[in-house]
Image: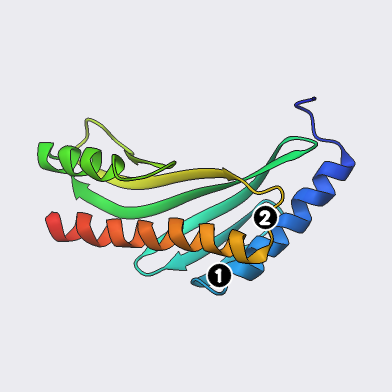
Amino acid sequence: MSNESGPDSSAAQQVLLERVATLLTEIGDVTDVDAESVVVAVGSTRASVRVIALADDLQVVSVTQLLALNLPNTDALRSDVEELDATLSFGNLRRSDLTGVTTDVLQYYTFPADGLTDIPLLTVLHIVLSGGDDIARKLVDAS
């Protein structure tokens, strides 16, 4: 198994990204699509969704979702982020700045997409992105 992706992998990556972009319209407002990513707004959040070929036979979908901007970087926020992070199955939450006065909170998820038909792929995307929107509301309400 090689870590380098060839032309076939690149084409497969593009096809998967186009599928993801189409499916994301069922979940939120797709605001930007380019050759490498899709940006979608879900509730109060925005997410960048990318397809990455780890090997010729292994593509993953990577989601980076901005949940909150410029929250006061307090011990209470740190505690809230740690508690909410513990509820995630495979993703994680992180503060963008651990020591500053304010910080952003992001959710990261990566999952394998090979073999997923549209409905399971849509389901995973929906769970991740709507879950992130739920967490965003909890964080903003708590601050």
Residue visible at 19% across and 38% down? 78
Mark 1 and mark 2 lie on one chain; the one further toward the N terminus is 1
Left or right, residue 78 beside residue 119 = left
Pick the quarter of the image with the N terminus: top right
Name the residue beneath numbered marker 2. Answer: 116
Residue visible at 57% across and 73% down? 25
Residue 112 is situated, as x and y percent measured from the top left of the image, at 62, 44
Name the residue beneath numbered marker 1. Answer: 30
Left or right, residue 123 beside residue 97 = right
- Disc 1/disc 2 C-alpha distance (Å): 21 Å
Q: Is residue 142 above or below residue 31?
A: above
Q: Is residue 30 above or below residue 103?
A: below
Give the camera-side residue of 123 and 27: 123
Q: Hey, which quadrant is residue 92 in on the image?
A: top left
Mark 2 is surrounded, within 10 Å at the Cα level, by few (under 14), some (14 to 19) or many (20 or more) other residues, namely few
Residue visible at 47% across and 57% down? 47
Furthest residue toward right = 7
